[in-house]
Amino acid sequence: MDLSVNLEFVRHADKSFEYGARKAAELGYRYIEPCFLMGRCLLSNAGYCHVQSFDLDPNYFKDLCGGLNLKISGLSSHSDLLDTGYGVEYARKGILYARALANLGLFDTPPVVMICETMYPPKWMAPDDAYAIMKMNLRPMLECCADNGVYLGVEPHGPYTAKRASMLRILELHDSPWLRVNFDTGNSFLAGEDPYAFLEAVKGKVVHVHGKDIAVKQAEAERGKVTGTAVGCACGDGVIDWKKVLGILRSANYQGILSVECGTEEQAERSLKHLRPLLA
């Protein structure tokens, strides 16, 4: 097991991807988790945002990451499982891009693309409709995964994925080895679930982990009222028991990456200092 950091740790500072990658390497991370969108972002082009485009030549990452001795843990593109339009297209672009990056030697672990559903489904969408849509959308996504050797990591972040019972139902929609879990410790906690019982239930399907801790103040204000948050506090500063999390992952012989999701450079540094000894 090793540590990565999601580039969200520089978003609130209005920094570029290159800045975030260099800072991650400077702090001592060996892996990063970049975020992607379709099309172009004016702020990213100007260097004020880390999010990158699928239109970018993958060799850009090979050159930059190679020079920094960094590898990629996964692609944070988060297409929408409940959207029948761009949801499938966005996911497939991510899968193909992950394959291109893997072909350039940027993954040490199996390539994975993160996905979840919208946190705010339309009010008219009944649960049975939602599962039917997810089943339909997952089929072409998983076919693309199989063709390219890329895993789909379903993340707890919405009204269906953030609940243990409904996540298990999603994982049963298709009998595919490419349908896996990107477990998020903080989102599952905020959704009102026991994150350790949740992780225990899906540990055999985990392909990537978001290491997200939740500050006590945020936990008291939001738990049970939301299904996730963009970033957490520094790992070790909040409510998550990291020894317990790592113990469950080890019991499943998990050999992948734990990618820290926090909001500042200082939190990324503290997270690394807290987690690294626990992985030794």
Image (cartoon, helix red, strand yellow):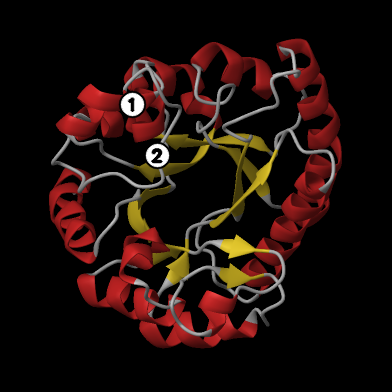
Label 2: element kind: loop
**Mark carried by residue 42:** none
Tell us which disc is closer to us: 1 or 2.
2
Q: Which residue is found at the position 63% from the left and 67% from the top?
A: 102
Picture quadrant where residue 211 is located = top left
Q: Is residue 76 left or right of residue 276?
A: right
**Mark carried by residue 229:** 2
Q: Residues within 10 Å of mark 1 (few under 14, many from 20)?
A: some
Q: Nearer the viewer, residue 208 or 228?
A: 228
Q: Which residue is found at the position 64% from the left and 63% from the top?
A: 37
Label 1: element kind: helix
Name the amino acid, label 1. Answer: Ile
Q: Give the residue at the far front of this rendering.
A: 123
Mark 1 and mark 2 lie on one chain; the one further toward the N terminus is 2
Q: Position of residue 206 (x, y in %)?
A: 51, 34
Q: Position of residue 115 (x, y in %)?
A: 62, 43
Relative to residue 218, is residue 73 depicted above or below? below
Q: Position of residue 87 (x, y in %)?
A: 76, 45
Q: CA distance from mark 1 to mark 2?
A: 23 Å
Q: Which residue is mark 1?
A: 248
Q: Which residue is found at the position 86% from the left and 30% from the top?
A: 136
> How many numbered marks have been drawn onto this rendered protein structure?
2
Q: Which residue is found at the position 24% from the left and 77% from the top?
A: 26
Q: Position of residue 150 (x, y in %)?
A: 69, 52
Picture quadrant where residue 227 is located = top left
Q: Are marks 1 and 2 in contact (CB under 8 Å)?
A: no
Name the amino acid, label 2. Answer: Thr
Q: Nearer the viewer, residue 113 or 82?
A: 82
Q: Residues within 10 Å of mark 2 (few under 14, many from 20)?
A: some
Q: Is residue 97 left or right of residue 193?
A: right
Q: Is residue 207 left or right of residue 187?
A: right
